[in-house]
Amino acid sequence: MVAQMLGLAFLFLHPCLLYFMTHGKSVYPLPPLAQQTNNVQVVYRDTAVYGVVDKAVILECGSRLPDMYIWSFTKPGTEAIKAVVFNMGKGANIQKLAEDFGQLTVISNSAALSIEKLLLSAQGLFTCQAFYETNGEFSVYYYYVYLTVRVPVTNPYLVLNDASPVEGSTMWMRCNLENGTGPIHYMWQHETRGGNVTVFAQGNTSVINVTNVNRNHTGWYSCVASNAVNSASSNRAWLDIIFGPDIPQIDVTPYTMTERGYSALEKETVSLLCQAQSNPASQYIWYYNNSQVFSGPQYTILKILRMHTGDYACMAHNTYLNTRSRKTISLTVYYPPDSLPSCSVEPARNYTSLRLLCSWAGGFPTPSLQWTGDLKLAERDQADMGQQTNSLTTTAIMLASEGLPPSSGFTCMGSHVALEQAAACSTRAYVPPVDPVCIAYVTDKQQNLMLSCSWDGGVPKAWVWWEGPGGQGKGGEENSNILRLPYGTARSGKPYICYAKHPLLVETKTCRVTLEAPVLLTQRSVVSAYEGSDVQLTCNLRANYLPVSEIAWFNNQGEGVQDTPKYMLLRTSGWANLTVRDTDETKDSGEYRCSTSNAVGGTEINVTLVVKKHPVPPNATLVKVNYNSQQRNEVELEWKVQNETNGGWTSFILEHKWVSERPGRRSNDSKKATERIPAPDWYSTIIQDPEARSHTVGKLTPTFTYQFRITPVNYRTVGHPSAARTPAEPRNNMYPAVVGAAIGGMLFATILTVLLLMYIVRNRNNNPRLHDMLFGLQHSQSRENINIPEDEVVGSMEGGTEEIVGSSTPGPTMALPRAASPLATSPQSATPSVSQDPPPGDDEPVSVTITVKATGS
């Protein structure tokens, strides 16, 4: 076939192929030659393929591998066909011309070409001439593949004829591109100072004209060039529109308007900010009453004075365009006081009177101050009333506390010509809402005991002092609210008294502290629990005035307790609880001690912990212990519990052990194979479900004999184990063998009886006695004794049984009944034991036992 194809190929391409193989220049299709062969079919296929420079492209030559094929190339604008790859049945041969297209390879098991790193010179017409032979008929396919190579657009760059045009002028922008296959689409993007990007213009031309530019055109510009292959964006170019300045805007801080313009308070910092829209930014000059005072956009006056009242003008100058604009404002400075009036109340005359003070600093002219309220008992303090020193105006009055209510309010009103409304301040004198509070605490390292007395919440502040037993105290000293005592010197059981005095009260308030040793309490002095539980022991401190050191616990061994896996401590300053985890009867029962102390003394309290075992659970009995298969590797167990309704168990312990070994199977030499196993122990299985009453034990050794027992458990208390039992064989193991043997024996006995009767009938002349005994003999003769072995055989036909040994292997035996007549049998159920009848008597018929021994597999 290959020879025929080669002949056909040369028939088609002889002139041109010979020329190609000798010169390597061109191959021309020869349709006229194809017409000379009647069994040749010529088919033409056109395909358009697009590729990208430096990328990969695949040129297909049919869907299956031709017997021979030739790839050729025709450059656009020419008619020359040049060979690229040919395969005449001996493998692909790639010509040097393929280097002009890129990295060309032939795809395995096909005639398709793969060109990687595609070059622009590969654009043109690729022709694949494919030759096929099918059932003696030849066909030629011409695959014309038109390859178009596209070039991606390169990164464009933007050109502006004027990067800084003046507002209202005209300009143009060009998007230059070095390379790229058309058609190319251009898009210009505009990005503002705030980062907002919009499409400014787009189209198929690379130049746009902008007429009447304005300040809104200011920003970054870039162009994006796109073709069928890719898109590329240029770098951004900044377009700066020149304009301005507009009329300036003046902002005054702080902002206060009057009829004459802006106003400010003396000694405040006033900031004047001038802003005018301009590009480039304008230069600013400030004028005060037509005199230049500052250059810059913001003019700040620190601590403005009354002399700064006047007209302020701002001039903006665009130096690039040499244009100017100007704006003027008026500023007035006022002089009110710098702050609001201040009121206060003080104790006077040994806490028997009140002194009201009101002051107001600054202001021009001097502000006026006046107290209002119920001032009938007021006495003017001539020394302080209406005085002004260093711009501070003050006034004061004196009030006797006698007759004043426990809560009295007073208001000081102040007015100034520079203020639209009067200013006021208020104060209140009142007794603390609660009684004095006394506390005791110990300093670090227990060096001192501090007694503190406070009577907070009142105005003015109350006067407190301490008096203790034995002269301990600072009695009489003002604000002596703390009494310090060296640790251990406090007097137990005797009160320490704190006195408190307020101007609105005639009597003196007191509070007492009586120092005592701590007293500990517990909820239960004897705590009982079952083993395994967590028990909490409590220890509380009875409330007293004196703080204690940390409450400590000691266990039943007298050791101090800390947080451990066994003990958990929860405590505060007033109580401490000890939790004993996972209690044990022998280890945790006993006396536990809680102890603490303070600056006066110490104390402790004992708590007895009694840990009891759980009650013994009721007994359990195994009711079923059976192998569940002949393999003897799994045992099914069932048990019952006494007093099921009473409960008292939480789980079961199932134990097993082997007690002996079964004989191994006999070998050919009749030697007994055994394994010597050491004396075993009980192996335990925990059954957590208290409702369980059955379990299956697997993975047993079939040659071992096991014993099982069950023990109920109540938490940690283990009951009495049940009696050990050995598993029984499966109940149905012998049934198939016995039944099969019985049926087989019955069939055998029936057939034997029929054959014997037929023999006797046919040979009645040879054995007349036997024939007459069975068929024609009188009754007296039929009961004749059998004295010879032959008669015993005959007697077996009359109702005896015969022992038939089915195997030498011992096994169960089965008795077969005799036939009642020569024509019928009456089978009975088999018995699993050997039947042995006594010797026949003088008047009884002879009975022979036929036994079938069957072995179970």
Image: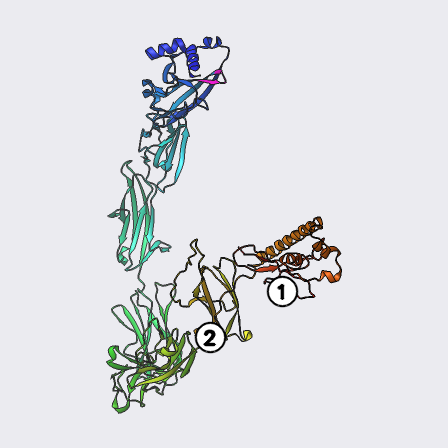
Q: Position of residue 420 (x, y in %)?
A: 38, 63
> What amino acid is found at the position of numbered circle 1 in the picture?
Asp
Residue toward you, 52 or 523: 523
Q: Residue 491 in the image: state x and y as whole percent.
A: 28, 89
Magenta residues (range) = 131-138
Tell me where residue 671 sits by quadrant.
bottom left
Nearer to me, 477 or 285: 477
Q: Measured along the vertical axis of the image, is residue 724 above or below residue 744?
A: below
Q: What percent of the width, then of the height, locates residue 33?
A: 45, 8
Q: Main secondary structure of the magenta part?
A: strand
Does 404 lie within the magenta span? no
CB within 8 Å, label 1 to label 2: no
Residue 207 picture location, percent across and down: 37, 27
Which numbered marker is on residue 837? 1
The disc labelled 2 sits on which kind of residue? His
Residue under the image location 66 percent in, 66 percent down: 841
- On screen, residue 756 versus residue 172, left or right, reads right
Identify residue for label 2.
Answer: 720
Q: Residue at x 36, y 39 (%)?
A: 192
Please name whichever residue, 785 or 228, is drawn nearer the observer in this view of the structure: 785
- Residue 553 visible in rendering: yes
